[in-house]
Amino acid sequence: MSVEDLAAKWSCFGRDVVEVDGHDIDELYDTFCRVNIPEKPVAIVANTIKGKGVSSAENNNVCHHAVQLFKADGDQDQPNQIQRENKCLKN
């Protein structure tokens, strides 16, 4: 999903905007500490990649939008057809 220039959009609403690497915990922590008592509302834009670090899931929408269902009889050990077709679960 493209959000184009999300920082610019928030800035138009009068927010101070800070962009960070959403996968960098130290950068996130430092940012939260720095904007703890802001002069005006702050928007923190944490840029991330869906599924980062899991090769079969990284930027793979199937892994993030698939409905996970089980057979009607409640047997969770036997996944239904939807789960078998989910490319995320094949690895």
Image (cartoon, rainbow, N blue to C red):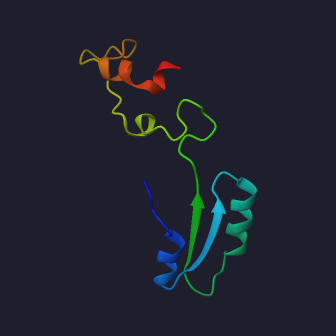
From the top left corner, tell me how far across and down residue 12 is, in percent: 47, 83
Relative placement, left or right, of 35 versus 6 is: right
From the top left corner, tell me how far across and down residue 84 is, in percent: 37, 18
Give the residue displayed 44% in from the left and 25% down from the top: 87
Relative placement, left or right, of 39 versus 3 is: right
The tally of labels here is: 0
Give the residue displayed 36% in from the left and 29% down from the top: 68
Front-lying residue, 76 or 18: 18
Give the residue displayed 71% in from the left and 54% down from the top: 25
From the top left corner, tell me how far across and down residue 75 is, in percent: 33, 13
Tell which residue pokes out farthest to the left in this image. Answer: 72
Relative placement, left or right, of 83 versus 49 is: left
Q: In which quarter of the image is residue 58?
A: top right
From the top left corner, tell me how far across and down residue 30 is, in percent: 74, 65
Front-lying residue, 83 or 5: 5
Give the residue displayed 53% in from the left and 81% down from the top: 15
Q: In which quarter of the image is residue 28?
A: bottom right
Q: In which quarter of the image is residue 37?
A: bottom right
Q: Identify whether 29 is placed above or below 39.
A: above
